[in-house]
Amino acid sequence: MHFTAERRLDDGVLEREFTLGEIPGILWTPGSASAPVPLILLGHPGGLPKMYPRLAGRAQHSAAEGFATATIELPGSGDRPRLAATEQARADLRRALEAGEPVGDEIIDALVLPLVERAVPEWQAALDSLLALPEIGGPVGYSGGVISIGVRLAVVEPRIVAAGLFAGSFIPRVMFEEARQVTIPLHVLLQWDDEGNDRQAALNLFDAFGSKEKSLNANMGGHTGVPQFAGDAAVRFFTRHLK
């Protein structure tokens, strides 16, 4: 991990850009921390420059409660090299949506599964480096989407002890089986009228999770209409499980 830039935000949060090999990322740490702090990994659908305002807002909200947060760019997104198979799957998805046709399992699998296979090891490598920093002490949570990446991380990464998952992306069939292997506490956020989300699939995935503690926070509105109090509830969830 190589830090490339840093600045203080208005609330004193230290924001540092870094690269992990060829992968760009950002780390936010509370300005007043006097001891190693817990860490939340911030998932997103890709494109760090576009996602930055929302990610920074989530990071500052979390820092106010004493958490460090970090994110990395997804494979094939932002300034990273494009993946031909993923680009083809996105084109097939656009054609189906524009034609008003159902999005078939083949398109969903081609779009999401290669991303999961590439992104999860990168998240684990980032976690290795982040936990080696003296200001980061753990425990670790994962918050955000793509929900299939969060599911896979919850299954394979024992250092993640709680997850807040955003139900706003297509879900491959295999993920329902993996969800049964998830046992950590979960807080799932669902926008009821999300225009790009299969609500029933999201509900089925929630039902499949094997966690003894899982909660579903469903709010009216579209994909970008998440109310502020939903974010407050997510932070309270992580406060219970990471502190």
Image (cartoon, grey):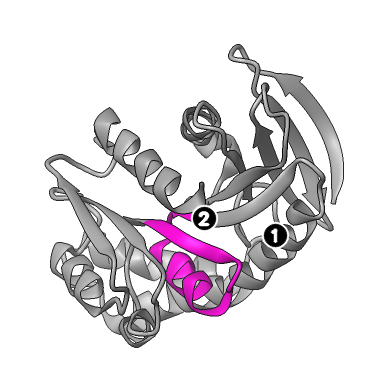
103 falls in the magenta region: no
Q: Residue beneath label 2, please?
A: 141
Residues at marks 2 and 1 touching, judged by CB atoms closer than 8 Å = no
Q: Which residue lies furthest to the top in this view?
A: 10
The crowd level at tag 1 (other Cα within 10 Å; few <14, some 14-19, many 20+) is: some
Magenta stretch? 141-164
Q: Where is residue 200 in the image (x, y as percent from the top left)?
A: 13, 68
Quadrant position of residue 239: top left
Question: Where 228 sits versus 157, above or below?
Answer: above
Left/right of residue 8 with respect to residue 77 in the rendered view: right
For the residue marked with disc 1, what is the amino acid?
A: Leu
User: Is 218 placed above or below 208 here?
Assistant: above
Q: Nearer the viewer, residue 37 or 6?
A: 37
Between 111 and 72, the one nearer to me in the picture: 72
Q: Which amino acid does label 2 sit on?
A: Gly
Residue 18 horizontal side relative to residue 61, left or right: right
For mark 2, does the 10 Å Cα neighbourhood hold few (<14), some (14 to 19), or many (20 or more) residues?
many
Residue beneath label 1, please? Answer: 127
Q: Residue at x 61, y 67 (%)?
A: 159
**Residue 130's x, y, as percent?**
74, 52
